[in-house]
Image: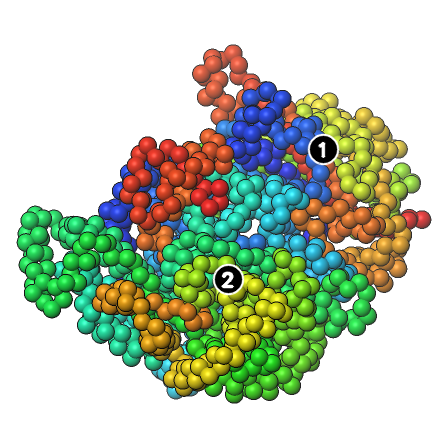
Amino acid sequence: MTSGSTAYNLDERRTSASMSLRHSQSGRPSTPQHHLRSNNSSFASTSSASSSLRGEEDAIVFEFGSRWLRAGFEGDSTPTCVVGCGPEDSRRAGDYRGWLKGSLNAGTSSSQPVKAEEWTGAYELWKMDVRDVDLGLVEDKIERMFRETYNKYLLTDAGTARLVLVLPSIMPHPLLSSVLSTLFSRWRFPSITLLPSPTMAVAAAGLRSALVVDLGWAETTVTGIYEYREIATKRSTRAMKSLLQETGRFLTRLSSNSSGDADEISVNFEFCEEVVSRFLWCKPQADDHGLFASSQLTDSQGGDSESKVEDIAGLLQKTVSIPSPSNPSSNYLEIPFSKLAEPVEKVLFAEGVADCDLDDEEKPVALLAYNALLQLPPDVRGICMSRIVFVGGGANIPGVRQRVLAEVASLIDQHGWSPVRGKVIEQQRQKLRNLRLNERPTSVNSEENTAPPSPKTSIGKGDQEKRDSEEDEIDPVEEKLRRTRDKDTKPPVQGILREVESLGPWAGASLVASLKIRSLVEIEREKFLQHGLAGASRDLDTHGHAPDRRSGLRSGGDRSSWTLAGWG
Amino acid sequence: MSRPFPYAYISCPCADTPVPDPARKRRSRETSHKSNPEDPNAPVPQDYDFEDERTFDPRSPRSNFSLYPPEQLLYCEDCHQIKCPRCITEEIVCWYCPNCLFETPSSMVRSEGNRCARNCFNCPICTAPLAVTTLENVTAGGSQQGPWVLSCGYCMWTTLDIGVKFDKPTNIRTQLSKMTDSSRGRQMSKTFSDLKSPLSTYSSIDDQFPLPSEIRGDETNPATEQSSGPLNPEARFQALKGFYKGQIASTSSSPNDPLADFGAGFSSPGALNRIMSLYTSSSRLGNLYGGTNKKPKSKPPVMREALTTSEGLRVPAPDTENALIRRMASDDCGWDGMASIEQRTFQSPDARFVEDLLPLPVLLRTKRSKRCKSCKHILVKPEFKPQSTRFRIRLIALSYIPLPTLKPLVPSPFAGLPSVTPAAAPNLDALSPLKTVQLLLTLKNHMFDPVRVTLATPSVTPGRVASKVTILCPQFDIGANSDVWDEALQGSSAPGDARASRSGTLGSTEKVAEAGKVWDKGRNWTTVVLEVVPGTLPGGGATRRNRMKQHDDDNDDDNDDSDADSDANVNALDWSGQTKDPNQQLQPDEDVLEIPVFVRMEWDSENQIDQEQSVGKGQNSDTVKRELAYWMVLGVGRISSEMGF
């Protein structure tokens, strides 16, 4: 960061502080006292005193995932560090065998096949299924991760600054409780703020409503968010964990050829993860719905999508060389590039599995997104479908986003917005479609012609669509509303499929924290230490559902109780 | 374990106090039948699963977090307790760059991103330190000429690979950030003007009552800007921040008091502002848009979402993903053209290829002083200067607890010549099951008081591989750590002391470990004998293993063929500890023979800090009885799967 930018930052912070003083007066008076007290008690040297002053300014934001912990200061655009969780992190102090390169390779190259679940299990911080999770162990891991993060990367005294945790919007209470009690009892955090990760992803995209597709570790969640509130959530187990397992199996097959137990994996986890992050990709949607799907998707595919698809098809014949799974340090192995797309398609998109064979919890991602959209009320759906935000590890696999969008488009095309399926319905719909046949293709063609590939024009197109629909049927009330509204706000983009990129939940939380916007869930040390999670009041009404509006109203008496909001 | 056998670990007693979960406490109070008051600080484990008399299991996954090598532990003199990294709090004394050893003032640390602001960089490919070198050859004579680059001496990467050259050899970091954030710099100034401080009357009014014509103008503005490509994440973040700030400022002021925004900035009387705002709004009323002006007054303006790139919105270009895929598959990329996870850790989230990686400024390090978590007593205080390695205060545990060392007792069939047969020492990396091994455990006292030690161990080690353990002399004394000369002087004056017992044992010709007798004893150390019968591995002889490969010890007489087989399943580490493997497979490290030993030491302390207490109490109690108890884990060796001969 340049010095100029820091000056800028400081400036901003000052204004934001003054703003926050004005906007949320209720919370302010209590917190500074906390800091002062901790200052007096624990700081002797001048340098660390000033560091605590610094800590007072900036909350520290941690984002918890099953695999990774992101940590950094509020107001930063990217986390200072991303810490993984693996068996090497659970070793005893002074056990440096992970660093003995030779022994590690020797141990893992020809390692024994392991059950897929155990293979990935060693690398998880926790499982959401708490039945067989040793919470004590999770506490130990969290404590060590936090301590090392502070000492190695954050380089600030732990416990002096406010802590902001970004958590999945659904957390088992035992896990939440052990996280909080570990942090509160180990360090003197004055308060811990919880923020839900999907909403933060939306904030980091500059939006207020969106459909957040989180291709996470244990599960993929699709969350419809409207005005920062979670409206609907759909979950599926088709996520990165199973993708890694599938890739592991694939690499195991490559390395051994002798297929033993189908569920056992003998390649190194790190190597497999490396393959996933470097080389997995996803083909564009197969062309059997072809033309129509891609033209529906003009805004994300571009006008000349046809040629691009051809282009990708040309890549299928290519081969790439990856280090041989059996001996990653020396040999290389040539494999067809198309093979590397297979695990993604099989796991995330359930390629080759009939829809009826799928359990409710393992719907492919595209169907999941469609279902989530379907579940939303129509007006929210219109807003959300043109604000699809992809986050999570799986969103980094090239091709996944466009594939999801294309498949959702084709699902919409197939079924419309009706959950009703069946042969008879299909026939009826076909009849209706025949009636309308003369209108539809023309409008599509015109869209395709007038849509160069840029978001700006997609906005324009939204307008145009609107105008088209206006021509169709003119509702005087709508008309009037629009006339008055058009003067001061632009009509929001809606009704078309569009992807919006987000900076990710961590950045969102950092943004929110730096704007001094208070979360609904702010757990204070003393209150938590008295009763733990059980002290949270369940009575949501007293706290209001709208934190923004009523934050100024949360007066002293109200603050005696706290809530877990969505986590409660 | 990676440590060479034999080793000793000490379990910090803090492991026995679980994290106090207030909710759990409350829950148990509501339902429970146990009425004892639960004090979170009580050393008694209050969990219901186990009694406080439970045996420490070195194999449980949690014990990994409480076991420390003795030299890593600290000791609090106030609490009289061992302190591990988990039960101390740390305060940063100074920040410094490990590369140039310059100290960074605390006010600068954060703004520099916790990284060195000078010329210290790490190679993005291999993390080796980069050197500033000139491109123009030194043969030209002037060493200061020419563009400069950073180059890695290890992997030969230079900044030329990413097309970066520097004008001068100093202040590389500033130059680099200027180069890489050129777009951002522009954007920053843009957001500045976007953000228009609330002090400027015009801008804030415009924010509140945006004119339609202005909106149109806004629209064209970003349109031209969009052609200049998407912002990098940092710039986007700043844009978003500016946008949100503007929105909050323009929406949260209460509708009937548009002055809120002014008032905050000005300390001048509000009346003036009101008049000004009346003036401006009336001039607005004079405008053609008079009708619309009423509305935002009656209804608070709604916060909107970001609409343009300059506000931080980013709609990905349609072909980005395909372009990525094509680049991945292209011939000049390949496996090594893609950045690995490790390389990407600290890079911009968009960096996917090796060409995207930037040199990383060296991460700063800190010197930290450590305090006891419960009593705030300072345990470690280093010198402030980064260059100094000295400590002002350092209370390491080893000066308070006896240092345990373990070594195998060489069985000597011929009592007269014990040194002739060193090869007969058992190979600790391959202990044969069911064959008794005798070990010498030496405890060395570093305190100035004699200590009475009681050792206890479960007769059978926990876990599936049950080894039998007997401590032949579980209770003994260790002498004080007096001056070395004291011993010599004492020895000359009074030979009947410690010297006597030692010489007595040495004198015994038949040196056989006897129950109830100390093996050997010195000035401040005592050695006792441990008898261990390693258990059999669950897989029996059928289990193959190759652990010995990397150890390659001199004597592989008893495990020749174990080297041939290979299947260490390091991968299958079961850290979660939730699966009980039903089949006969050996868990990793299950064949390591580790003995939990409970150490309880008692001593009469009379010096130093206790002086204060005794002053308070009066002179009569000049000695205070102290005791300390903790679990210790002795790693003896690996049990081989082959039965011994």
User: Is residue A225 at least partly visible in the picture?
Assistant: yes
Q: Which residue position holds label 2?
A: A374
Asked if both marks, 2 and 1, belong to the same chain, the answer given is no
Q: Are marks 2 and 1 in contact (CB under 8 Å)?
A: no
| Quadrant (top left/top right/bottom left/bottom right) for the N terminus of chain A | bottom left
Binning the other alpha carbons within 10 Å of mark 1 as few (below 14), some (14 to 19) or many (20 upward) gives some
Q: Which residue is drawn at 39% across and 55% down?
A: A228
Residue A467 x/y as whole percent: 32, 75
Between B326 and A313, the one nearer to me in the picture: A313
Question: What's the residue type where badge 1 is placed?
Answer: Thr
Q: Disc 2 on helix, strand or loop?
A: helix
- Which three-letter amino acid code belongs to the residue tagged 2? Leu
Please, which chain is the residue tagged with disc 2 on?
A
Q: What element carries label 1?
A: loop
Quarter of the figure with residue B398: top right
Of B452 and A338, nearer the camera is A338
Considering only vertical position in the picture, is B469 above or below B558? above
CA gap between label 2 and label 1 equals 57 Å
How packed is label 2: few (under 14 Cα within 10 Å), some, or many (20 or more)? some
Q: In the picture provided, is B512 more to the left or to the right than B630? A: right
Q: Which residue does the image show at 71% across and 24% down from the upper left?
A: B497
| Quarter assignment of residue B240 | bottom left
For label 1, the residue is: B55
Q: Reply above or below: B625 against B150.
A: above
Q: Where is residue A375 in the image (x, y as percent from the top left)?
A: 50, 58
Which chain is mark 1 on? B
Q: Along the horizontal axis of the image, is A48 left or right of A87?
A: left
Q: Residue at x 65, y 30 (%)?
A: B48
Q: Residue at x 31, y 61 (%)?
A: B304
State the image quarter where residue A508 is shown.
Answer: bottom left
